[in-house]
């Protein structure tokens, strides 16, 4: 882990080196004060050397002016370096998240991922900046003060050092407890973020069902958990700081008594005693800095560990010999495909079917039967447990994911639109498309006329998830995307099931045009929309139970026939 953390310093070697030099000089300047104090009390004042008193005072002032500029450099450029490292980590994490498979997002909440990208990386940034500085300044100050203390009186210095093991023992004992407490605290923050993200995203549902109190209850549950975790963390931190502060107070008592006895016995004079007292405080201060740094270190290390958990998640990988698919024709073959989510019960169990190029193939059946899973396997969003999926005779595992998905267009029931302009949302289908192509795609999706009624036309921002649009308008924008992409393979996963009958009729004409000349897989809830499919398969409990045309399946009197007659009767009643 340390090696991976240090790698982020490489692009900033110059700033880091200058920052460390500045920090080292600051620690050396700190020792000047007790040295001048000793000379003042032991020589200049007793000998009434006023000239040297003024020179020494001005020299000390000059040293402090230099330290002021060094401190500015360390504070400014050190933080800039930390922010740049944080930005690089954030970019690395985002790029890695883009490469992770669907299965990762099935098991990780958005709010928790966001917490790692914001709160955790902020703590890492602080550690990246302050960590080396604290270590260098404190270490240099401790070494310099030790040498200076020994030059005054080594026996008195040895007495002081005898207190150090007690300080270290206490720090090491409480360190682990504090680290565990802060880890639990960080996890609770992620839980709150996840709950908050879920509640805000679903605020319209909450208001529609008057369930604000339920959401408050869920949020307060996480909030209470956070308070408890934070309380434990602060208790551990309080124990840590109070115990270590007590030991540093013992340092002062030891110096006061032992130094007084050394002065009384004539081993050192008053000037040495004063300088020793100041130097001891300079020794204790960096020791305390290192001890207090433990808290920041724990936050940073915990954050970096959580950062690495995501960075170490296995990304989607193409086969070593994967090739570009080029432009596919669209013949799809499933050969004894088995698939299960997370080693659970098989969702698909031995699926075998063939969709000829340019044909329309419909999947129907009860919810949970495996229809959507089949749609997700074709673009290789998930890896099959066993069996094989081929397109144009090529195993999809032998093709690069990017080139495979370039040939597939998907229109789903749950449309995701970005909080951007209508133009940008359509352009998502093909980013290099011209304005004329965008307009043509909108026309073919029967959404252009509506767009032109808007004040800003294609520049209209549609809000988060397209909240300012109706369900039908959102669906037509998603269809426009696919028109712009113009793929040879099309997947319609219950694309109209959430729409009313009138809107569905309007959109169905756009979908029919979209399907022309393409291999199309349709998952349908309303069977009336897939009567003209070239072939229909009934999927139940992960297996194909029936296959044939609409007429053949009706004549067979099986599951499809029963479903169709049921929907037909419901339509008559309506």
Image: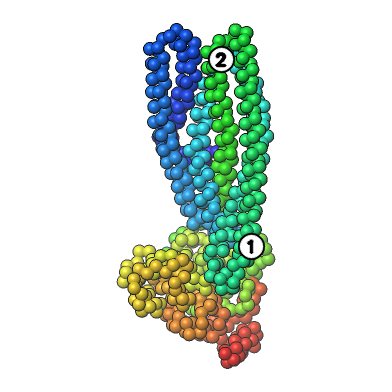
Q: Is residue 481 left or right of residue 379?
A: left
Q: Earlier in the sequence, mark 2 or mark 1?
A: 1
Distance, label 2 to label 1, CA atoms, is 63 Å
Q: Is residue 529 left or right of residue 50?
A: right
The residue pinned by badge 2 equals 273
Quadrant housing residue 101? bottom right
Closer to us: 311 or 490: 311
Whether tag 2 and tag 1 are in contact, CB under 8 A, the answer is no
What colour-coding does the image apply?
rainbow
Image quadrant holding the N terminus, namely: top right
Instruction: Determine the residue positioned at 64% across, 17% down.
Output: 257
Instruction: Determine the residue positioned at 59% across, 86% down.
Output: 567
Give the structural element (helix, strand or loop) at label 2.
Answer: helix
Q: Position of residue 282 (x, y in %)?
A: 53, 24
Q: Position of residue 400 (x, y in %)?
A: 48, 60
Give the structural element (helix, strand or loop) at label 1.
Answer: helix
Instruction: Determine the residue positioned at 60% across, 7% down.
Output: 266
Instruction: Determine the residue positioned at 58% across, 92% down.
Output: 572
Quadrant housing residue 157? top right
Closer to us: 291 or 569: 291
Residue 547 seen from this side: yes
The residue pinned by badge 1 equals 217
Q: Position of residue 143 (x, y in %)?
A: 53, 22
Closer to us: 396 or 190: 190
Image quadrant holding the C terminus, namely: bottom right
Q: Is residue 316 left or right of residue 435?
A: right
Residue located farthest toward the bottom when viewing the structure as drawn: 572
Residue 519 seen from this side: no
């Amino acid at each position: 882990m340390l090696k991976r953390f240090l790698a982020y310093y490489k692009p900033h070697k110059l700033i880091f080196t200058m920052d460390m030099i500045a920090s080292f000089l600051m620690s050396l300047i700190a020792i000047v004060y007790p040295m001048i104090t000793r000379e003042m009390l032991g020589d200049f004042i007793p000998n009434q050397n006023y000239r040297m008193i003024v020179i020494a005072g001005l020299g000390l002032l000059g040293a402090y002016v230099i330290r002021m500029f060094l401190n500015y450099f360390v504070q400014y450029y050190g933080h800039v370096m930390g922010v740049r490292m944080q930005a690089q980590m954030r970019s690395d994490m985002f790029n890695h998240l883009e490469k992770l498979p669907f299965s990762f997002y099935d098991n990780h909440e958005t709010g928790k991922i966001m917490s790692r990208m914001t709160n955790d990386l902020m703590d890492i940034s602080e550690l990246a900046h302050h960590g080396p500085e604290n270590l260098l300044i404190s270490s240099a100050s401790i070494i310099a003060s030790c040498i200076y203390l020994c030059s005054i009186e080594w026996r008195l210095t040895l007495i002081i050092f005898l207190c150090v093991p007690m300080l270290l023992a206490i720090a090491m004992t409480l360190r682990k407890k504090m680290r565990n407490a802060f880890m639990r605290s960080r996890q609770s923050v992620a839980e709150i973020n996840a709950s908050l993200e879920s509640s805000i995203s679903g605020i319209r549902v909450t208001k529609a069902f008057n369930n604000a109190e339920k959401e408050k209850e869920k949020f307060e549950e996480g909030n209470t958990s956070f308070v408890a975790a934070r309380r434990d963390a602060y208790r551990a931190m309080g124990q840590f700081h109070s115990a270590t502060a007590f030991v540093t107070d013992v340092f002062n008592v030891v110096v006061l008594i032992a130094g007084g006895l050394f002065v009384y016995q004539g081993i050192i004079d008053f000037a040495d005693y004063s300088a020793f007292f100041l130097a001891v405080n300079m020794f204790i201060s960096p020791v305390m800095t290192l001890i207090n740094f433990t808290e920041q270190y724990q936050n940073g290390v915990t954050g970096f560990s959580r950062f690495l958990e995501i960075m170490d998640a296995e990304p989607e990988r193409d086969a070593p010999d994967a090739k570009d698919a080029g432009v596919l024709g669209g013949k799809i073959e499933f050969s004894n495909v088995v698939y299960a989510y997370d080693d659970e019960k098989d969702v698909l169990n031995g699926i075998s079917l063939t969709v000829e190029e340019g044909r329309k193939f419909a999947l129907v059946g009860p919810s949970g039967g495996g229809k959507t899973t089949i749609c997700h396997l074709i673009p290789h969003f998930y890896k099959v447990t066993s069996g094989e999926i081929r397109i144009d005779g090529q195993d999809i595992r032998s093709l690069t994911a990017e080139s495979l998905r370039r040939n597939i267009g998907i229109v789903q029931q749950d449309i995701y639109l970005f909080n951007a302009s209508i133009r940008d949302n359509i352009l998502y289908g093909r980013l290099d498309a011209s304005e004329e192509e965008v307009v043509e795609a909108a026309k073919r999706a029967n959404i252009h006329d509506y767009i032109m009624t808007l004040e800003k036309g294609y520049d209209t921002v549609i809000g988060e998830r397209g909240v300012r649009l109706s369900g039908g308008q959102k669906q037509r924008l998603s269809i426009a995307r696919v028109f712009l992409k113009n793929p040879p393979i099309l997947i319609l996963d219950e694309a109209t099931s959430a729409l009313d009958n009138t809107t569905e009729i309007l959109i169905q004409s756009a979908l029919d045009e979209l399907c022309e000349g393409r291999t199309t897989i349709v998952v349908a809830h309303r069977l009336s929309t897939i009567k003209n499919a070239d072939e229909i398969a009934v999927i139940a409990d992960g297996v194909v139970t029936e296959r044939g045309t609409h007429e053949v399946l009706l004549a067979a009197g099986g599951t499809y026939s029963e479903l169709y007659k049921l929907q037909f009767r419901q339509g008559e009643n309506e």
